[in-house]
Amino acid sequence: MTTPIDAGAEAVAQALRRLEISEVFHNTLAPIVELPVLHGIFAEGAAGCTAVFAETFGLTLPVTFEHAIQHPSRDALAPCAGMISVIHLVTEWGARIVIAYDRMLLFRALDAMYGGDGRSVAPAAPRALTRLEQSVAEKLAKSILEQFRTRLAPFVSFDCVVERIEQDFDPAIFEKDRSELVAAQMRLGESEEWLVVAIPVRGLELAREQIATPHEEPPLELDPNWSRSLEQSVARTEVELVAVAAGPPMLLGEIASLQPGSLIEFDAELLEVVQIESDGEALFEGRLGQTKGNFSICVEAPLSPAADDESAEPRRRRG
């Protein structure tokens, strides 16, 4: 009986065998490091590192993706010489991922964890790391790797374990490793301190088909009835209309002396012409009259016509 784990391992093994066959045609394919989607993943991962440094270690340190190279292991890891490097084994690929960073990142993180700001840390003399420092160094590397693993997961998933920590990395330890790595180099802040994430090409090649073409959003389908429905909804909206008649001019003192029962005389002609307003905006002008015992207004002209209605003559209708 085949278990799900065995089936998954066999699927990866088959994919790797197909990859070995496709390497015959390697020269006809663009290097995977040149694929723009991969550069986008590295840039997003760098931004994720900025966030996790602040959230987990209390360290404010922008991380910026600069560039990526694709070379045999020793050449790809040459920029990591002298850095703290945490080597992770990916068993399903039979390969290793390397997270390397400047020693100052570790001491900045330690300073921030103990109440500092990580900015005024002086370079420490070369020495072996303490057990606490090694623990934080490994935690740093795991948090960095997770930013890239989760962003690669939709294309190719993998699990890895820490194999060892190199406190003063020497690329020569990969002398016999003939496989290729894609090494993404990221700048820490505005200094000359660097972070490198090196991922095996053979693992990324498993996702070439998915990351070769940028993801395109499906075209947005507009509802043909949308504009009609909007027009109907707007037309059904209830508004309050107010009829306003021009009153006689009065002094401010006369207005202040008005009391309940005071009389204001209106010119009869002024009451004939009124404006219809809504929310303080004048809409129409008309004449006041009576219909079936109720006051009514005969609309004569709009006061705020639409642009396409400005040339049209006003129509008379009963209000």
Image (cartoon, helix red, strand yellow):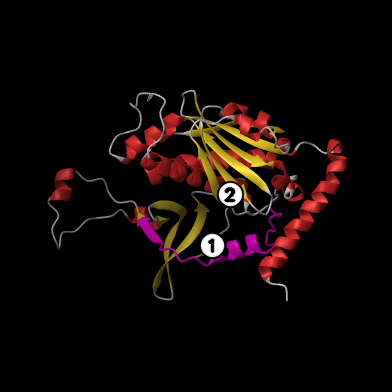
Left or right? Give the position of 225 relative to 293: right
Q: In the rendered view, does 24 fall on the left or right side of 294? A: right
**Residue 283 badge:** none
Question: Is the residue 145 above or below the residue 240 in the image?
Answer: above
In the image, taking residue 259 as reference, residue 294 lies left or right, namely right
Q: Looking at the picture, how far across and down is residue 30, in whole percent?
A: 79, 36
Residue ID at (66%, 31%): 74
x and y, in percent, of residue 297 in the image: 44, 63
Q: Amino acid at mark 1?
A: Val
Nearest the viewer among 53 and 110 is 110
Mark 1 lies on residue = 234
Front: mark 2 or 1 = 2
User: On the image, which quarter does residue 260 sit in?
Assistant: bottom left
Q: First in sequence, mark 2 or 1: give its number.
A: 2
Observer-nearest residue: 164 or 298? 164
Could you tell me how far apart the alpha carbons at marks 2 and 1 are, in whole angstroms?
50 Å
Give percent across and percent down for residue 232. Answer: 58, 65
In the image, residue 289 above or below residue 180 = below
* For the residues bearing labels 2 and 1, Cβ distance under 8 angstroms: no
Return the mark for residue 149. Answer: 2
Q: Position of residue 182 (x, y in %)?
A: 67, 37
Task: Specify the amino acid type for callout 2.
Answer: Arg
Secondary structure beneath dot 2 equals helix
Please provide the residue range marked out in magenta: 217-244
At 68% from the left and 70% from the top, the residue drawn is 4
Q: Between residues 2 and 31, which one lies in front from this camera angle?
A: 2
Q: Which image quarter holds the N terminus?
A: bottom right
Q: Is residue 223 magenta?
A: yes
Residue 220 drawn in magenta:
yes
Q: Tag 2: Cα neighbours inside 10 Å, few (<14), some, or many (≥20)?
A: some
Q: Is residue 296 visible in this depiction of the protein? A: yes
Image point 38% across, 59% down: which residue? 243
